[in-house]
Structures are given as C-alpha cells and as structure tokens.
Amino acid sequence: MSLIRIKDATDPSTWGPAIDEAVHAISRGDLVVFPTDTVYGIAADAFTPSAVQALLDAKGRGRQMPPPVLMPDARTLDGLATDVPDSARALAEAFWPGGLTLIVRAQPSLAWDLGETHGTVALRVPDHPVALALLRRTGPLAVSSANRTGHAAGRTVEEAYAQLGAAVPVFLDGGEVPGGVASTIVDATGDVLRIVRGGAISLEALRAVVPVVDPAAADAGPDSDDPGIARPAPGDPDR
C-alpha cells in the first residue's frame, strides 16, 4: 500500500496539511476519498464534468447512476435546488447533518453534469468532522461510496484504498467510520415524499417529522452501501 497517498486526518489540530492537499486535488479535477458518517466516500468537484466522469469510471458504473452531492450545510440547499417542498425542508432541518439524502429538483441554471439525473439532484449534509472540514473549503462535491460497484463500501481508509487506490491520488484517513449504514434516500420531487432506499433514518423517525411518507422501499438492499441511485424521468409512474 502506498501510504504516501493516505493522509492522517484523525486529529483536527494536525489535519490542516491533509485537508489542504485534498482541496488542491479537487481543484485540479482529481478524486479524493474521505470519511463520512455512513461510509467512506469518493468525491469529485460537482461542477467539473470530467471529474464526475472519472468518479463513475473509478467505481465502474454508468451515467444512469448519478452520484449524490454532499454540501457543507443546509443553507446550500436553495443554491442547488428549486421548488423544495416544505415537507422536505422539515426533514432537512430535523436530520441534517446526518444520514438523510433528499432528491429534489436541481436549479436549471447550474453548469454541471452528474449523469442522467433528469433534472433532479440528490443532496445530503454529512455528520462527520473531516467531511465537513473538506466541504467548507471546496463547496458541494459529487460523492459516492468508496468502493467498486457491487462490492462492500469501505468503513476504513484501508478498505477504500484496496478497491480504489489506482484511481485516487488523495485518501483522508479519519479512522473507522461510525455508521456503516447507508443514508436513507427520500424523493421529494413528487406530490408526496417517497422513500427510495431505506437506511440510517428509520421510517418511524421520518414520520415523526412528516406524517405522510410513502415507504416505497423496504430496508436497504444488497447494494445499499452505494448512495448513487438511478432516477427516472419526471412523470415516470415508477418515480
């Protein structure tokens, strides 16, 4: 293992150079792996299409499975999304930062290409100090779980490196992640909120905030480690 590419980010008092290197990598259009509150993630600048494509290539996935976007705080929501329903805002207020991903309608003016999103974007604010330290410097990042598609997501930097080492120049080591369970994904683009994937936030917890949430997905399935999801076109009855 090439430890040169693995940077210690376990201590906020000393992780400055590691965060700096990750920020510089993102600005160059390179990929970075870092810990989140769920699993380790592989990240690219959301506004650099070639970087997003490199992320998809590293995972071995196609454009039909666009990556979510992680944000430093909930205030970024209105800069990236439009027509966000009050019910989705209530969930964001209750569970961000944390293990909730919201699919909302993307701002049409944004110059990005995340894949075949059909005008939507999946947004989350992670609850991990390393992730937030990086996001505050870079702004929104396209992030998917740090694994090859079909394999288990890394809970340690070593597990992530074993799968993605050849494709990623900078790995931030924040220790073993506390979660290990993927985020719950809620589609907020329709008339009612709809669970697309079960995960870290239970249906009961969601319903305690928003009474009507359609449990369209059961518990997280075999590929639930991977927060990338295919999003059907607006109006699709299976949306």
Image (cartoon, rainbow, N blue to C red):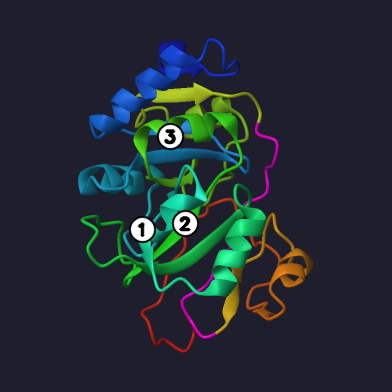
Closer to the eye: label 3 or 2: 3
Query: Is 83 drawn above or below residue 224 in the view shown?
Result: below
Whether residue 1 is visible to the viewer of this picture, yes or no, is no
Q: Where does the image place residue 193, in percent across and percent down from the top left?
A: 58, 77
Residue 80: give its label. Answer: 1
Residue 66: give its label. Answer: none
In the image, what residue type sits under mark 3?
Answer: Arg
Q: Where does the image place residue 186, in percent across and percent down from the top left?
A: 57, 68
Marks 3 and 2, the one that precedes in the sequence: 2
Instruction: Sort mark 1 into few (<14), some (14-19) or many (20+) by Cα contacts within 10 Å.
Output: many
Whether residue 215 is visible to the viewer of this picture, yes or no, is yes
Q: Which segment did they paint magenta?
A: 177-191
Residue beneath label 2, please?
123
Query: Is 235 drawn above or below residue 211 in the view shown?
Result: below
Instruction: Sort mark 3 into few (<14), some (14-19) or many (20+) by Cα contacts within 10 Å.
Output: few
Determine the image quadrant of residue 185: bottom right
Q: Secondary structure at mark 2?
A: strand
In the image, what residue type sits under mark 2?
Answer: Leu
In the image, what residue type sits under mark 1?
Answer: Leu
Q: Residue at x 60, y 35 (%)?
A: 128
Marks 2/1 in contact by CB < 8 Å: the verdict is yes
Q: Secondary structure at mark 3?
A: helix
Q: How far, Cα to Cα, is label 1 from label 3? A: 15 Å
Q: How far, Cα to Cα, is label 2 from label 1? A: 9 Å
